[in-house]
Image: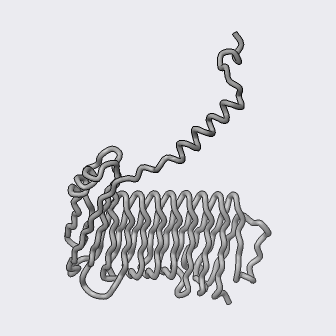
Amino acid sequence: MRPEHITGRNPVSIVFLSLLFLLTATALPLIAKAKAEDSFHQVIEAAGLEEVALETVNGSIDVTGCDGDQIIFDAALMVEGKKEATCRELLEKIEIDVDKDGEILHIDYESKSKRGYSITVSYTLQVPRQLEIDAETVNGSIDLKGITGEVDLETINGSIDCFDLSGGASAETINGSIEFRNVSGELNAETINGSISCVCKGEAPESADFETINGKISVELHKTPDAHIEAAALNGKIRLYGLSNIELIKKAQTFSSVLGSGKGSYDFSTINGSITIDIRGID
């Protein structure tokens, strides 16, 4: 028996019925997830502390440096899933851990997981600006501003934004961008899928090591650094501004030069993306 006798339907009719089914399905009301939320607040004396170490899994981290000798810590807790009762049950089992270990303040949390339910714990802190910060999350962004101590930041799915830091910074993500604004000291930035940018209107960083695979790198400095600069863009081109005394081959993919005393080291590398270097304070 031939195939058309088996189906017994015209191909046009089949397509029409399929489209009708899709339109009917999308017209049905969406089933909203249940949600339960809570908050945590604590004021911690910072006397004797040198570092704050933060760790969460699904949630953002926001740290602001300020004057004073106290740490103001707030956490936003949220559970989403099918049933509100289960969300509240899981919410009540989240425990925020705040522990002083010598000169380090550790902030973390414990929770009970359940299939079909997501738990989000985000941190917001005001800390004495001289403290060192070690922050780590998996699914969430990290924002730091006004810190003079050294910072070490790591996430997997999220962006990292550093503003007004003077103690140097190390930032690492996989899926997300990294941004430095008015940051000095030694800078290290590494991402796989994301761009890296650095804008410094004050002092230029002592050194900078920026590396990405799928993304562009842009650097804008308002003062000439004393550094040896190396740049490489495998599948992209390098653009230079403010370096009138340095010749660059059109569509160049590598660049090397020494500015000032060459004391520091600037190393920029990308595979799929461009590199832009704008040094506005050059003589």
Q: Is residue 113 left or right of residue 203?
A: left
Q: How is the image coloured?
A: one colour
Task: Estimate the x, y position of residue 238 in percent, counting from the top left.
Answer: 70, 68
How many numbered circles does the render carry? 0
Q: Residue furthest bottom?
A: 283
Q: Can you say which quadrant of the picture contains the C terminus? A: bottom right
Q: Is residue 148 left or right of residue 181?
A: left
* 259 to 153, vertically: above or below: below
* Residue depicted at x 20% and y 67%: 99
Q: Determine which quarter of the picture holds residue 16.
A: top right
Q: Can you say which quadrant of the picture contains the N terminus? A: top right
Task: Estimate the x, y position of residue 128 in percent, counting from the top left.
Answer: 30, 82
Task: Estimate the x, y position of residue 66 in percent, counting from the top left.
Answer: 34, 85
* 149 to 209, vertically: above or below: below
Task: Estimate the x, y position of residue 175 in percent, counting from the top left.
Answer: 51, 58
Work out whether residue 199 or residue 77 is closer to the camera in this orientation and state it. 77
* Residue depicted at x 56% and y 73%: 265
* Residue depicted at x 53% and y 42%: 25
Work out whether residue 24 or residue 95 is closer to the camera in this orientation and state it. 24
Q: Residue furthest top?
A: 1
